[in-house]
Image (tube, rainbow, N blue to C red):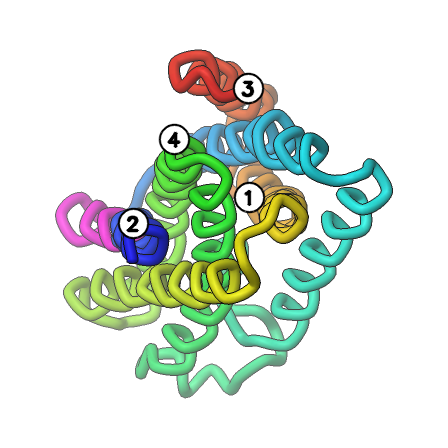
Amino acid sequence: MKEILAPVLLSLIAGAASGLGGLVVYFFGEVKDWLMGFLMGFAGGVMLVVSFLELFTEALGLLSHFQATLAFIVGALLMMAIDLTLPHMEAGRWERGVARPKFLKSGLIIAFGISLHNFPEGLVVSASYSRLPSLGLMMAIMICLHNIPEGIATATPLVLAGVSKRKAAFIALLSGMTEPLGALVGSIIIVRLGASDHIIGMGLAIAAGIMTYITVDELIPMAHEYGSKSPKHIVSTGILAGMFFGHLVSVLFSIG
C-alpha cells in the first residue's frame, strides 16, 4: 500500500504548487516579465538535468540503451499527443483556435485542459518512487519548482481577461490536482505488473521523455516569450542556474 500512497501524496504536494503560483498573482498581482523569464528558464534547466542525469541514467541501469531510448521516445510522443489534442494555456496565452474566446471567462475549459495536460507528471513521480523513494521525492520537488511559475502563467492572463483573482487562483490550483491521479494510475500499473526492473526501467525512460518534452516545448519557449524584452541573457542565466541547482540537489540526495 505504501508503494501507492507515497507517490500519490508526493504528487499531491507537487500539484498543489500550481496553487502557490496562483496565490502569488492573488496577493501581488502580475509578476514582472523579466522575473518570469528567469523562473521559467530556471525550471527548464532543473528539468533537463534531472531528466537525463537521474531518470534516463537510472533507466539505463535497468534496460538496454535501445530499450531506454525507445521508451524515452514513447514518453515524448505521449506528451506531444496530449499537447496537440487538449486545450490548455501555453506560454501564458490561450492557444489560438482551440476554443472560442467567450469561454475564457468561465475558466472551465481551461481548467480541464491544463489538468489533463499535467496528468503525466504524476506518472513521473510514481515511476521515480518505484525505483528509489529518494528519487521520487526529488522529482516531486522539481515538479514543484516547475508548477509555481506555471501557476503564475496560468492565473495572470485569466485575471487580465476579467476573471476574479480568487477564481484564477483556484483554477491554477485545480490545474495540478490531476497529478496525484496520474501517480495513482502509474503506481497501480507498476504494482499490478510486478514492479520488475524492466517495468520500472521503462517507466523511468518514459518519464524522462515526458519531462524533456515539457521542458523544450513549454518551459524554455515560455521563458523566452516572457524574457523577450528583458536583458539578453536573463533566460540563459535562469537555465544555467537551474542546471547548477539540479546538479546540487542530485549531490545532496546522493542519487546520481
Q: Main secondary structure of the magenta part?
A: helix
C-alpha span from label 1 to label 4: 25 Å
Residue at which label 4 appears: 134
Contact between marks 4 and 2 (CB within 8 A): the answer is no
Crowd around label 1: few <14 · some 14–19 · many ≥20 (10 Å): many
Q: Secondary structure at mark 1?
A: helix
Residue 25 part of the magenta segment: yes
Residue at which label 3 appears: 256
C-alpha span from label 2 to label 3: 22 Å
Residue at which label 1 appears: 219
Front residue of this view, candidates 160 and 188 = 188
Labels 1, 4: front one: 4
Is 122 situated above or below 61? below
Q: Secondary structure at mark 4?
A: helix
Quadrant in the picture for the C terminus: top right
Identity of the residue drawn at 74% across and 40% down: 63
Residue at which label 2 appears: 6
C-alpha span from label 1 to label 2: 27 Å
